[in-house]
Image (cartoon, coloured by chain):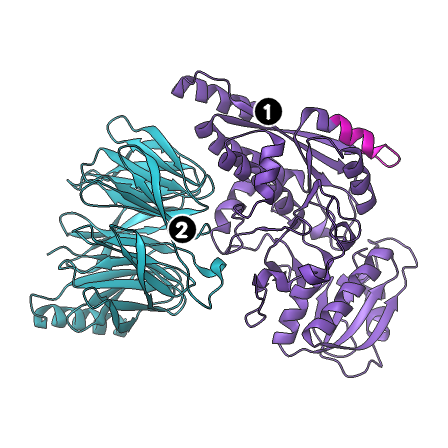
Amino acid sequence: MWRRCLLSGMAVWLAAATPASAFIAYVSNEKSNTVSVIDTDKWTVTNTIKVGQRPRGIEFTRNGKFVLVAVGDDDKIELIDTATQQVVDSLPSGPDPELFTQDAAGKLLYVANENDNTVTVVDLENRVRVGDIQVGVEPEGMALSPDGKILINTSETTNMAHFIDTATRQIVANVLVDARPRFAEFKRDNSEVWVSSEIGGTVSIIDPVKRTITGKINFSIPGLRSEAIQPVGISITKDGKTGFVALGPANRVAVVDATTHAVTKYLLVGQRVWHMAFTPDEKYLLVTNGVSNDVSVIDVSAQKVIKTIQVGELPWGITFAQP
Amino acid sequence: MIRRLVGIIGLSVVASHALAADPVEIGVGYLGQAGINSKLSLVEQPSENDGIAGARLAIEDNNTTGKFLNQRFTLEEVRVRDGEDVAKAATALAGRNGFIIADLPADALLKAADALRGSKTVLLNAGSIDDRLREQDCRANVIHVAPTRSMLADALAQYLVWKQWKRWLLVVGSHEADKLYADALRRAAARFGAKIVGERVFEDTGGARRTDSGVTLIQRQMPVFTQQAPAYDVLVAADESEVFASYLPYRTWDARPVAGSAGLVPTSWDAAQDQWGAIQMQNRFIKLNSRRMTARDMQAWTAARMVGEATSRTNSGDPKSVFDFLKSPDFSVAAFKGQRLTLRDWNLQLRQPILLVDGRMVVSVSPQEGFLHQHSELDTLGVDRPETKCKLN
C-alpha cells in the first residue's frame, strides 16, 4: 500500500516534471505479472503496474488512451488506462492470447490464441468478440499490411505465415517458412514482410503480392553455436532501410541492411532478447532481455547500446505511446 | 476418433477451399507390444495408450498443417502379443504405410527392420533406448527418436558434476537392462569426472510390487541395504526393471540425494515441462487424451511430427523423398526443447536436450553449460561420431 502510494505519487510528480520530448514505454514482465513504465527522458522506471497472469503481448491503442496487454494465463487482454496507469477493464479473447495487432482506425483487434489454433477478432469499441479464424497449430505472430487488407498470422508448429483477407476473414495464401515462426513485420511501403523463425534460425523475406519467399536472412556469430541463434522480435525503420532482429539466447540484436538483407552488425544486449520498439522519433530502439530482467537502449543512428534499464522479472513485450 | 477427425478435416478442406485434387495420403503405422510394464509408483503406472497417444496428437497437428498443403495423415495401430511374429506384422503394416513408428524392444525392432529391408517403408524407433541399435546393430532403415541410455546417463552425469556431487554410490538391479544402464552410468562418470566410490547389486527376489504392509517392510530394508557405504555425495540407482529404485529416496542410511532411476531422473520428456512453448502442447495433449504426457508419448509425437515436417518441406508423401530429406543437413524439427533437433548422420539418432526431473518439476536441462563440443553441444550426450561402431548399409 505504502509502496503503491509512493509509486503513484512519483508517477504524478514525474509526469509533471518531465519535458514534452520524453516518451513513455510500457514493458510486460512475463514472470512478475507486472508492466513497467519507462520514461525515456531519464531512462528510468517510473511506475510498476500489477496486471493479470503471464503478461506478454503489449500495445498502445491508436488513441493512446489505453495500453492493451495479453495476460495469457488468465485468457484475456487487459486494458491499462494510461491516465491513471491502472488496469480498468479487459477484452475477451480465445484461450491463452499472446500477440495481437489492431487496424489503423483502432477499431478491430486481431488476437493470436496459442491454445486454440484460432485468431480471434475483437471489436475494440464495444469490447466484444466478433469472429474467429481457424489457422495452423499454435498461432503467434500477427501483422497487418499497411493498407489493412491482409492480416499475417504465423503458426509455430505448422511453420506457416497465413495470409488472411481482412474483408472476408478467409485464408487466401499460406507460405511455409522455417521452424517455429514467431513474429511478422511489414515494410511501410508493403514491399516486403519479414517473418522470424525461432528454431529455424532465419528471417524469411516474403513478397506480399506474390506471396512467396524471395530471400532469407541468415545469422552467424563467431564462437556461438548456431542452435543458440533464435530470431524473435523484428523492427524496421520507417524509411525501410534498416531492420533490427532480436536473436533470443544469442543475446544479440542483428542490424540488417533492409535493402540487401545482409547483416551489418551484431549488438550485444542482455540475455534472451525477445521484442523491441522504436521511440516515436526513431532515435532509440528499446529491446527486452528476458533472462537478465532488463531493457537495453540502442542508439539507432550510432548503432550502439547506450543504456540498460532494470525492469521486472522476464520482460517480454514493449510498446511506445505515439505523441 | 482420429479417423473421424481426419475425415472432418478432409471434408472441410474440400468444402472451404474447393481443391481440385484429392489430398495426398500419408500413412503412418504404429507397431507396439500388447500389455504394459508395471511401475513401482502407482501414479507412474503407464496407460494402455502410452506412446500412441502422442502419435495421435502429432497426426492431428500434421493434419492441421496438412489442410493447407493438401496432405492427409492417417494412423494405424498394430500390437503384437508375446510369441507373435513381429516381422510379419511389420511387413503387413508396411504394405499400407510408408512410415512406421516402432515402440518395440531391441530384438523385436531388429526383426522388423530386417523384414523391411529393401522396402520403401521407414521405421522410427520411439521406444527402445538400447545403444546397440545405434552402434554395432544399427540399421539404415531405422531413425531413432528415443534417446539412448548413454545420452540419458551423460545428461545426468553432467548435472551431478556441475553440482559437484562427484562421488557416486552406484546401486544396480539384477536384470539385463539394469546392467546396461549401469554400464552407461560408469561410462558417463569416467567421461565427465565423477567417481564411483562403491557399487551394490539389488537382487530381484521376486514378489509383488503392491502389498498391504509394503511401507513398513521397505522402511526396514532400505536403510540397512545402504549402510556402511564409503563416503559419497549421491546415490545413483540403475533400476530400469522397476524393482527397488523408487524405494530409495528418504530411506538411505546416510542423508544423501538419489538420482538415476529414482529421485532426479533423466528423461526425454515430462508432464511438468512448460518451457519453450511446451505448455501449449501439454494442453493439447491433455485435451485429446484426458491424461498427462509421458516421455514415450513425446517420443511418438516427435516421430510423427518428423514425418509431418519432412512431408511439408518436400511437399511429397513419397517415403523415399521424405526419408532422404530427413537424412539431409536441411532437416530439423522443433519439439519444445529450446533448440532445433537434428539427426546424427552416422547412425540416424535424433540429437536432443535431456530433461532432469524429480516427478514434480523440471530441475534442469542438459547439456549443461560449459560442456563444449566442436560441432553441437548436443553431441556431448551419448556416443559421438569418433567412437561409433555403426556402419549404415
Considering the numbered disc 1 on the image, is that residue within a helix, a strand or a loop? helix
Chain in purple, by letter, is: B
Q: Which residue is mark 2?
A: A202
- Disc on res. B3: 1
Q: CA distance from mark 2 to mark 1?
A: 36 Å
Q: Quadrant of residue B120?
A: top right
Q: Can residue B88 be found in the magenta stretch? A: yes
Of the pair A142 and B239, the residue shown nearer to us = A142
Q: Is residue B350 above or below residue A38?
A: above
Q: Can residue B33 be found in the magenta stretch? A: no
User: What type is the residue that disc 2 sits on?
Assistant: Thr
Q: Colour of chain A?
A: cyan
Image coordinates for residue A172, horizontal then vertical, percent: 33, 28
- Span of residues in magenta: B80-92
Query: Is B268 placed left or right of B92 in the picture?
Result: left
Q: Are marks 2 and 1 on the same chain?
A: no
- Disc on res. A236: none
Q: Residue at image x 44%, y 47%? A: A180
Q: Residue at image x 68%, y 24%? A: B96
